[in-house]
């Protein structure tokens, strides 16, 4: 059936054969209601089924409840299978040290993937459009990115975006012509999120400069995606010279240095992904740190990876296992990975010592999800993840740091200090943290 969105029709026809179930992510807003209506109309007579999935982020109270009821009732009236889920995006944001927008995105996509798996849907459709793509491009340009991360991909895994070259105005016209109902998320009118600021203040200026600015940005994103694919193919050729064995990769520096600069970082990221099995949280900054390693130097990377400059070769492999928890008694010094923790006296020059009121039984562990401390002079309890980030500690370094705790309660950590409840003056006990490379220490 014709749906009056020829680009999207062409996209769908190119990707989805008969027998496919399309699971549409439907918030109830105008864009997603257009997606659901469009997908249902396009699927007629093609032996393709359509279902709707709605996620409640736990952020907007009664208005979010209204949205879920609206989508549920709309689907029930039209015989469209419906599945819903709920989460607490705010708690995830606080727990993981994420922005609220990023936390909401993570819990939403986790739900969509689970819903698709439960329904055995081959495809997840989202209603991202050209305006969304333009906003993402501008955000990523502000953050600093390569062409690979500049825009929203039309296809990523089993997630497809048939509206990516359509503007919000085109979708509004489609909804008006069809008389489609929808609900409004009142937070979209606020300017407290970076994306909303771009939407309300920056994109209107770009349209004044060029009325087709959004379409042109979408076109640029498409061209960059094509170029990105070509660079990936060249990177694959470069990596034919790498030795891959289980969780270890070795690549001659000569091959890397002879390659164009545009391929070097890609090659490193590709090797990292091959070892750890995923790309998320692996960035150009990590690749840059690897490429900058001096001879004989090494650096920790996400997912327990370690990079080493072996002189003639770059080596990437799984690092040694994480340190195991160990009890700490007064006057005792314990090893914790490359760290040493001493209770009762100050350590060698270059170590970091804090005064504390020892609460009794103590142990040294890794940080744990949900750990919180209140530091002297702070404004209350904060997660260790956030405190380490504020102190400029990378996730890779953070994940191997010692945390002194009593039971489930963190007491002290290097770079942070002592929790307010356990802090003490000059009469307190010393706790000292230092690494094996401090003078006088050996592995």
Image (cartoon, rainbow, N blue to C red):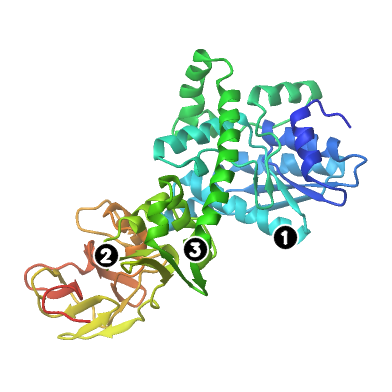
Is label 2 in contact with label 1 (beta carbons under 8 Å)? no
In the image, residue 340 sits, relative to residue 420, either above or below, namely below
Q: Position of residue 216 (x, y in %)?
A: 58, 24
Residue at the farthest right position: 45
Secondary structure of the residue carrying numbered label 1: helix
Q: Position of residue 258 (x, y in %)?
A: 40, 52
Q: Position of residue 411 (x, y in %)?
A: 26, 70
Query: On the image, numbered disc 3 is attached to which residue?
Result: 241
Which comes before the other along the chain, label 2 or label 3? Answer: 3
Q: Nearer the viewer, residue 61 or 438?
A: 438
Task: Locate residue 48 relative to residue 416 in the image: left or right.
Answer: right
Q: Nearer the viewer, residue 344 or 297?
A: 297
Residue drawn 71% across the image and 37% down it: 162
Query: On the image, numbered disc 1 is attached to which residue?
Result: 117
**Label 3 to label 1: alpha-carbon separation:** 38 Å
Circle 2 or circle 1, nearest the eye: 2
In the image, residue 265 sits, relative to residue 12, either above or below, namely below
């Amino acid at each position: 059936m014709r749906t009056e969105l020829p680009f999207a029709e062409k996209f769908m026809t190119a990707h989805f054969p008969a027998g496919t179930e399309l699971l549409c992510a439907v918030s109830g807003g105008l864009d997603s209601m257009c997606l659901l209506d469009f997908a249902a109309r396009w699927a007629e007579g093609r032996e393709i089924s359509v279902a709707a999935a709605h996620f409640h982020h736990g952020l907007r109270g009664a208005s979010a409840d209204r949205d879920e009821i609206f989508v549920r009732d709309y689907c029930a009236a039209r015989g469209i299978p419906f599945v819903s889920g709920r989460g607490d995006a705010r708690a995830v944001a606080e727990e993981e040290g994420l922005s609220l927008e990023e936390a909401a995105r993570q819990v939403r996509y986790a739900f969509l993937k689970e819903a698709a798996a439960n329904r055995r849907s081959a495809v997840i459709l989202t209603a991202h459009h050209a305006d969304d793509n333009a906003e993402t491009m501008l955000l990523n340009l502000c953050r600093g990115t390569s062409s690979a991360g500049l825009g929203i991909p039309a296809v990523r895994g089993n997630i497809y975006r048939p509206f990516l070259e359509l503007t919000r105005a085109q979708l509004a016209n489609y909804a008006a012509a069809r008389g489609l109902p929808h609900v409004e998320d009142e937070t979209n009118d606020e300017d407290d999120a970076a994306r909303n600021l771009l939407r309300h203040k920056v994109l209107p200026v770009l349209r004044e400069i060029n009325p087709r600015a959004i379409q042109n940005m979408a076109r640029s994103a498409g061209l960059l995606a094509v170029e990105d694919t070509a660079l990936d193919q060249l990177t694959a050729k470069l990596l034919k010279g790498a030795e891959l064995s289980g969780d270890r990769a070795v690549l001659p520096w000569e091959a890397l240095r002879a390659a164009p600069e545009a391929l070097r970082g890609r090659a490193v990221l590709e090797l990292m992904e091959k070892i750890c099995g995923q790309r998320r949280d692996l960035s150009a900054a990590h690749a840059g740190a690897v490429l900058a390693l001096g001879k004989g130097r090494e650096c920790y990377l996400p997912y327990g990876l370690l990079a080493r400059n072996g002189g003639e070769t770059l080596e990437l492999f799984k690092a040694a296992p994480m340190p195991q928890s160990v009890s700490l008694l007064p006057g005792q010094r314990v090893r914790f990975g490359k760290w040493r923790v001493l209770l009762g006296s100050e350590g060698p020059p270059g170590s970091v010592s804090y005064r504390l009121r020892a609460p009794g039984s103590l142990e040294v562990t890794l940080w744990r999800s949900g750990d919180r401390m209140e530091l002297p002079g702070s404004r209350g309890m904060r997660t260790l993840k956030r405190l380490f980030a504020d102190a400029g500690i990378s996730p890779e370094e953070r994940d191997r740091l010692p945390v002194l705790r009593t039971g489930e309660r963190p007491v002290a950590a290097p770079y942070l200090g002592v929790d307010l409840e356990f802090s003490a003056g000059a009469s307190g006990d010393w706790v000292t943290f230092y690494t094996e490379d401090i003078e006088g220490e050996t592995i």
